[in-house]
Image (cartoon, rainbow, N blue to C red):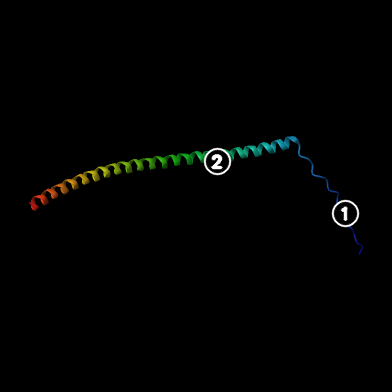
């Protein structure tokens, strides 16, 4: 059986893309990047809106808490005044009993 040698065709160097093709590819990549950026900005704006709502809720809670603290402070002062009056009354009774 005769032997045969297989010869490869010479390889051509890949052709440089035409400037129009490179520009078309660059513009497509730019469009894709801009679309990703639009989506990211929209998500960021949505998250800012949610954060604004959370901050507003926190502000309302803190205002209510401040009102409750003010009320508790007033109640504590009233209780202190009542305790001092009772103490003065008790001291007066004790002084009368000691005479």
- Label ID, residue 7: 1
Q: Residue furthest front?
A: 99
**Residue 32 in the image: x percent, y percent?**
62, 40
**Residue 11 in the image: x percent, y percent?**
83, 48
Instruction: Name which residue lies at 52% across and 39% down.
Output: 42
Left or right: 25 as drawn, with respect to 3? left
Left or right: 59 as drawn, with respect to 13? left
Instruction: Name which residue lies at 30% across and 44% down.
Output: 69
Depth check: 62 or 3 in front?
A: 62
Which structural element holds mark 1? loop
Q: Quadrant of residue 68?
A: top left
Q: Earlier in the sequence, mark 1 or mark 2?
A: 1
Depth check: 40 or 79 in front?
A: 79
Number of disc labels: 2
Q: Pick the quarter of the image with the N terminus.
A: bottom right
Q: Residue furthest bottom?
A: 1
Instruction: Name which residue lies at 76% across and 37% down.
Output: 18
**Badge 1 density bin: few <14, some 14–19, many ≥20, Cα 10 Å:** few
Q: Residue furthest right?
A: 2
**Badge 2 density bin: few <14, some 14–19, many ≥20, Cα 10 Å:** few
**Residue 21 in the image: x percent, y percent?**
73, 37
Q: Would you name the residue on which mark 2 appears?
A: 40
Q: Quadrant of residue 40?
A: top right
Left or right: 71 as drawn, with respect to 38? left
Give the distance between the C-alpha atoms of the residues marked 1 and 2, in whole angstroms.
55 Å
């Amino acid at each position: 059986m005769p032997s045969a040698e297989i010869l490869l065709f010479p390889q051509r160097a890949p052709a440089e893309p035409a400037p129009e093709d490179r520009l078309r590819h660059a513009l497509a990549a730019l469009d894709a990047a801009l679309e990703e950026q639009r989506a990211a900005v929209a998500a960021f704006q949505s998250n800012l809106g949610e954060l604004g709502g959370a901050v507003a809720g926190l502000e309302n809670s803190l205002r209510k808490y401040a009102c409750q603290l003010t009320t508790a402070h007033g109640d504590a002062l009233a209780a202190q005044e009542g305790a001092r009056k009772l103490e003065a009354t008790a001291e007066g009774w004790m002084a009368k009993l000691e005479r």
